[in-house]
Image (cartoon, rainbow, N blue to C red):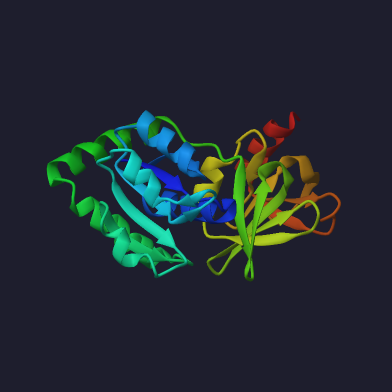
Amino acid sequence: MKALIIEDEQPIAMLLENMIHELRPDLSILGVTTDITSSMNAISSHPDIDIIFSDIKIDDGLSFSVFEQVQTTAMIVFTTAYDEFALRAFEYNCVDYLMKPISKELLERALTKCEQRIPHADMMIIRSAVKEIRQQKVITRKRLLLQRGQDTMICNVNDICYIFTEKGNTRVFLKDRIWGDIDISLIELSKSLPDNQFCRVNRQAIVNISFVGGVAPGPGRDSIISLIIPYEGRQFQITQDRKKELLKHLGV
């Protein structure tokens, strides 16, 4: 399936995109638009869109104007902080109406409703085709959306020193010593970060090889790697096989 996001607040759009990617990795997001004109152009250019996740109040008005001016068969999931538009929303091809902040549970409900509108046979064909594509290509992330308390941050992967997971919580540490949590597993991150820049050193950590300062003998056949400033005191245990991979990336 293919989806479009209409949202004028970039952090919210990225959060929604990440949640969709986690809940439905086979759902292709064609892009994010922020105003009426760009949204109309995107829908006109992609008549095969299956789902539109649309905020209601956007940069230059209400997104209802988009659906009044452009014909689409796409299912629409409205995402908004205002409940005053609920009745009007269902005048359009609205499948669900999600109040912000959007939870995974509510998003899962909306996605399930959309899938239930697609014939079962068609869904099987779609999932089979997407599975083949996913086996051939993994999307490389360039940015991550991080949470720190109530704040949302966008970081470039080049600014990441290391990523550490403990008790189910994954935390990203940046080169300016700022950190943020991310709701993506270490396994998924290790597959989607640039493999010539990041190395998963053990079951709990991924490091940016640019911040590796040294490798020293460790317990048994394992080694200990240490990082450079600003995390010069941070060390990680690494197995023999992963050490070889790390040294290969370092050109040693």
**Between 147 and 158, the one nearer to me in the picture:** 147
* Residue 185 shows in the view: no
Residue 130 in the figure: left or right of residue 5: left
Residue 18 in the figure: left or right of residue 219: left
- Which residue is drawn at the image coordinates 49% and 51% (left, top)? 61
**Between 136 and 212, the one nearer to me in the picture:** 136
- Which residue is drawn at the image coordinates 76% and 30% (left, top)? 252
Residue 127 x/y as whole percent: 26, 41
- Which residue is drawn at the image coordinates 43% and 66% (left, top)? 103
Q: Is residue 139 above or below residue 169?
A: above
* Residue 35 shows in the view: yes
Residue 45 x/y as whole percent: 38, 29
Residue 4 x/y as whole percent: 40, 43
Residue 252 in the figure: left or right of residue 9: right
Split into 4 quadrants, where in the image is the N terminus?
Answer: top left
- Which residue is drawn at the image coordinates 18% and 51% (left, top)? 117
**Between 117 and 214, the one nearer to me in the picture:** 117
Residue 175 x/y as whole percent: 78, 51
Q: Is residue 153 above or below residue 139?
A: below
Residue 209 occupies quadrant? top right
**Between 84 and 154, the one nearer to me in the picture:** 84
